[in-house]
Image (cartoon, grey):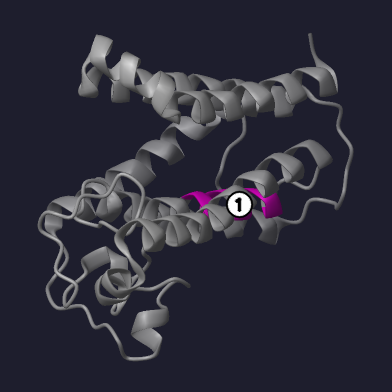
Amino acid sequence: MGGWGELFVAFAAFLLSHALPARPALRRPLAAALGERGYLLTYSLVSLAALAWLIAAAGRAPYVALWGPAPWQAWVPNLAMPAACLLVAFGLGAPNPLSFGGRADGFDPERPGVAGVSRHPLLLALALWAGAHAVANGDLAHVALFGAFAGFALLGMRIIDRRKRRLIGAGEWNRLAARTSGWPLAALVDGRWRPSALPEPWRLGLGLLLWLALLALHAPVVGVSPLPPG
């Protein structure tokens, strides 16, 4: 199966791979059978496999140009991806009860860490990755694919904010979120948050390694060099 049909099926499979395991009726027995870590590992592997298929299906879809290629377009992901990798490095495992999967233990609302940059650093990283790659790929299949990811990430931030506010109560949510940012760096711009400590070196190193790994693997895996022409 190829063409648009494969892309639609791959996109549906990707959505189901995220929606179904998150439902309590399915998550509870899976977590009981596999253990919490086993469940999260399996969930991550299935999600990565579905994502790889989706990206490959977009590459095999009929080419319909929306705009012509230009050298400057390659600079957009090359400038966005270091920031996205740093957001991933600083967001993974950081105390953050305001985002999905975040833990409350260790979170200080007076010094919220990466939540001062964004309450949802992983979703912001996804939005940067997707939006930048939509610019660099001017064909219908890839613009639709990356545009959907960017929209999913941005909408997800609002949905999680509303859900967390409902679950923990508006007063507690306002207390915890007082020095955090909905829009990227909003708390820094309006003076509600200032970085209170030097960045953790190991997280900086992790972000750098992730960025370099993506650069190195892009051409052999995707088939296209990510570097700007010349």
Residue identifier under label 1 = 150
Q: Nearer the viewer, residue 213 or 6?
A: 6
Residue 220 visible here? no
| Residue found 21% across the figure and 46% down from its top | 93
Q: Horizontal and vertical percent for residue 35? A: 21, 17
The range drawn in magenta is 126-135
Q: Is residue 153 above or below residue 198?
A: above
Q: Horizontal and vertical percent for residue 197? A: 12, 74
The quarter in which the N terminus is drawn is top right
In the rendered structure, which amino acid carries the disc numbered 1? Ala
Q: Nearer the viewer, residue 8 or 201?
A: 8
Question: Residue 26 occupies which quadrant of the picture?
Answer: top left
**Total number of numbered discs in the rendering:** 1
Q: Horizontal and vertical percent for residue 224? A: 62, 33
Q: Main secondary structure of the magenta part?
A: helix
Residue 182 visible here? yes
| Residue found 80% across the figure and 25% down from its top | 61
> In screen coordinates, is 30 left or right of 153?
left
- Inspect the magenta stretch and tell me whether residue 7 lies in it: no
